[in-house]
Image (cartoon, helix red, strand yellow):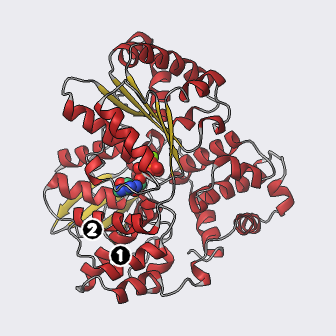
Amino acid sequence: MQKVWEAVLEDLRGRLSAHTFAAWLAPLELVGLEGGVLQIRIPHRFFADWIAARYLPDLVETMARRAGAPVSRVEWVIDESIAGSLEPPATERGPSAREARVEVLASRRASARPRARERKTGELPFPSSGAGAPAPAQRPERSSVAPPRPLEEDTLNPRYRFESFVVGPSNQLAHAAAVFAASAPGKRYNPLFIYSNVGLGKTHLVNAVGHRVREERPDARVLFISAEHFTNEFISALQHRSIDEFRARYRTGCDVLIIDDIQFLATREQTQEEFFHTFNALYHADKQIVVTSDVYPQQIKEMQDRLISRFQWGLVADIQAPELDTRIAILRKKAELESIALDDAVALFVAQRVESNVRELEGTLLRLAVRADVEGRPIDLALAQAMLGSASRPSERLPSVEEIQRAAAEYFGIGMKELLSGRRHRGVSQPRMLAMFVTRELLRLSYPEIGRRFGGRDHTTVISAHRKIEAQLPHDERLQRALESIQKKLGLG
Ligand code: ADP
Ligand code: MG
């Protein structure tokens, strides 16, 4: 079973950014899977909360697939002693391990705001800290952090294929260009640059390109990698003096290079330089290059002009938020893939209620399916209304940036002026970074936009604040408490 677990983590590693994986998934340990109950050991109860809201569907699904057994519930075993291996420790931890068992339904599907809604309808809330009787620790030995695995390209997500991609007016061009590039790599749309807001299908589409090329040309070498992963690998190659290998792989050892989320290279001068040469080598050898980004090439700030202009040599295609009909078609497709019985009325209702983001649309459908399962009833309009509310209620409204700022300022007992000021004192910068983090997580505003709303800061400041908080959260209880209080203040707790 331990092997299965390792394989599960490996699968997830391919789908998440390296630092997310390291911060949140790598510390998890498998206790066991029995009778549909998956037990996972976590260093803090905060992990349960965070993972449940983001990675649980993927985790549960991958586990079920790999283990060949259903997972109906996840039980978290909190064990602070394993926090010792987390980097860097926030505080000294005493020798006594505290374990507590808490449970959540495996159904805790990712969605922007599952918590408030689920509470209302009496589903299990997130585990409260220390719930359950302390149990004696009986862990396998754990001496140190696992050695870093050799870096390699991300793997293609098996679910992201053209066959499972729904085409509509919002994504028609991007889709057509992707299909063309996959069938005739390096020929016409080179590079292919696809951009859109988050959750609209970029990653799905470029994975589909990779699958299609591999199907049609089994010997073609397809590399799919996030720009972040590319960066890390480059840095690591520099450190380990293996830059020649790195270059051989990306410049000559590759027929199709797919780079996801290129905006990550913003401000990273040296990696941009490297990527520039990679690009040229591939381009002049007529190799296909596919790039995704969350903004149009010229809007990627702090990106070398010569790269920006190269991004526009081929085809630049955007993906817009899907129209109602496309949203309905996507719901139907997902329902079919997941063997969920979904009638037209429910599909219409959900598609009307979830408008801007396909990931959320998907999450809503999965949550509905699990709720129906748990309650032993069909997915009908009544259930959908119970979950999504029959009309938009004010409480379902997301908070504004100002409300988030105010909540953070109040929690830390500082003024709004200070929060938005340029002061770098930790007592002010920490609340500010946390507020930026919450804004990004909750509202999915772009980094430049968040920068503007926080006193005209550069987007790189926002990105680094977000990363800092994300890295700190898993092992900083003060920060966790602050985040929870702020969420409560915002009516999300
Ligand atoms: P992005 O990379 O733009 O943030 P993703 O490719 O990760 O978005 O898509 C988010 C989710 O929405 C994925 O699960 C993906 O399968 C799904 N999705 C997005 N667009 C479509 C579509 N047109 N048809 C089917 N699924 C889609
Ligand atoms: Mg993506």
Give the percent coordinates (x, y) of residue 441. Answer: 57, 58
- What is the quadrant of residue 307 in the picture? top right
Give the percent coordinates (x, y) of residue 372. Answer: 28, 81
Of residues 178 and 403, the one nearer the viewer is 178
Residue 84 visible in rendering: no
Identify whether 436 is placed above or below 382: above
Disc 1 is placed on an element classified as helix
Of residues 488 and 184, the one nearer the viewer is 184
Q: Which residue corresponds to mark 2?
A: 335
Residue 308 visible in rendering: yes
- What is the quadrant of residue 395 in the picture? bottom right
Disc 2 is placed on an element classified as helix
Identify whether 460 is placed above or below 100: above
Quadrant in which the C terminus appears: bottom right
Of residues 355 and 106, the one nearer the viewer is 355
Which residue is depicted at the point 29% across and 42% down? Answer: 10
Which residue is depicted at the point 50% across and 66% down? Answer: 112
**Which badge, 1 or 2, is on the more N-terminal residue?**
2
What amino acid is labelled 1 in the image?
A: Ala
Of residues 274 and 431, the one nearer the viewer is 274
Q: Which residue corresponds to mark 1?
A: 347
What amino acid is labelled 2 in the image?
A: Ala
Is the C-beta separation of discs 1 and 2 under 8 Å? yes
Give the percent coordinates (x, y) of residue 488. Answer: 61, 74
